[in-house]
């Protein structure tokens, strides 16, 4: 029987959450410091919005994959326990 392993490493999971929260934090700083927006400030907001979007996508993917992996590993463990009892 093939042992199932998780698709995402801990480092990738941490990176996805960090990217999302860093984007939200930086965007909040930008909103706090708003006044009249110059061209370079508009570029900053666009870059941070892209960072938040990528972070949100990564976080959603990692969360979904980890939940599916946990279900599959639990099922595999259950089957393993049943086969050892017979």
Image (tube, rainbow, N blue to C red):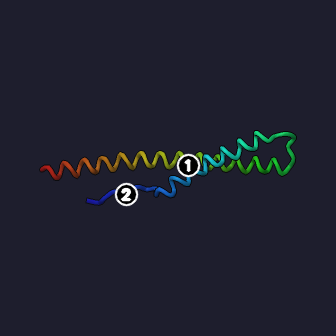
Q: Are marks 2 and 1 in contact (CB under 8 Å)?
A: no
Secondary structure state at the residue bearing disc 2: loop
Left of 38 or right of it: where is 75?
left
Q: Which residue extends farthest bottom? A: 2
Asked which secondary structure carries label 1, the reply is helix
> Which is nearer the eye, 21 or 73?
21
Direction from residue 36 to residue 54 in the image, left or right: left
Mark 1 or mark 2, which is nearer the start of the sequence?
2
Identified at 43% across, 56% down, the residue is: 7
Q: Which is more toward the observer, 32 or 44?
A: 32
Residue at the far left: name it. Answer: 86
Q: Nearer the viewer, mark 2 or mark 1?
A: 1
- Residue at figure coordinates x 35%, y 45% from the top left: 71
Q: CA distance from mark 2 to mark 1?
A: 21 Å
Q: Which residue is mark 1?
A: 17
Q: Please report the residue visible at 18 percent of the width from the left and 48 percent of the height from the top.
A: 82
- Residue 8 lies, in percent from the top left, at 46, 56
> What residue would you read off at disc 2?
5
Q: Quadrant of the N terminus?
A: bottom left
Residue 74 image position (x, y, % from top left): 31, 47
Query: Count the marks: how many?
Result: 2
Quadrant position of residue 25: top right
- Crowding around mark 2 (Cα neighbors within 10 Å: few <14, some 14 to 19, many 20+) is few
Task: Say which mark, if any, is on residue 32.
Answer: none
Task: Identify the residue shown where x is 87% and y is 41%.
Answer: 36
Residue 57 x/y as whole percent? 58, 47
Characterize the local packing of mark 1: few (<14), some (14-19) or many (20 or more) Cα atoms within 10 angstroms. Answer: some
| 32 on left or right of 19 | right
């Amino acid at each position: 029987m093939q042992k199932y392993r998780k698709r995402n490493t801990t480092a990738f999971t941490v990176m996805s959450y960090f990217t999302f929260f860093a984007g939200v934090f930086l965007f909040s700083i930008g909103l706090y410091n708003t006044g009249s927006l110059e061209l370079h400030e508009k570029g900053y907001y666009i870059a941070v919005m892209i960072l938040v979007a990528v972070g949100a996508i990564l976080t959603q993917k990692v969360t979904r994959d980890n939940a599916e992996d946990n279900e599959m590993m639990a099922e595999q463990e259950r089957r393993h326990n049943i086969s050892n009892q017979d």
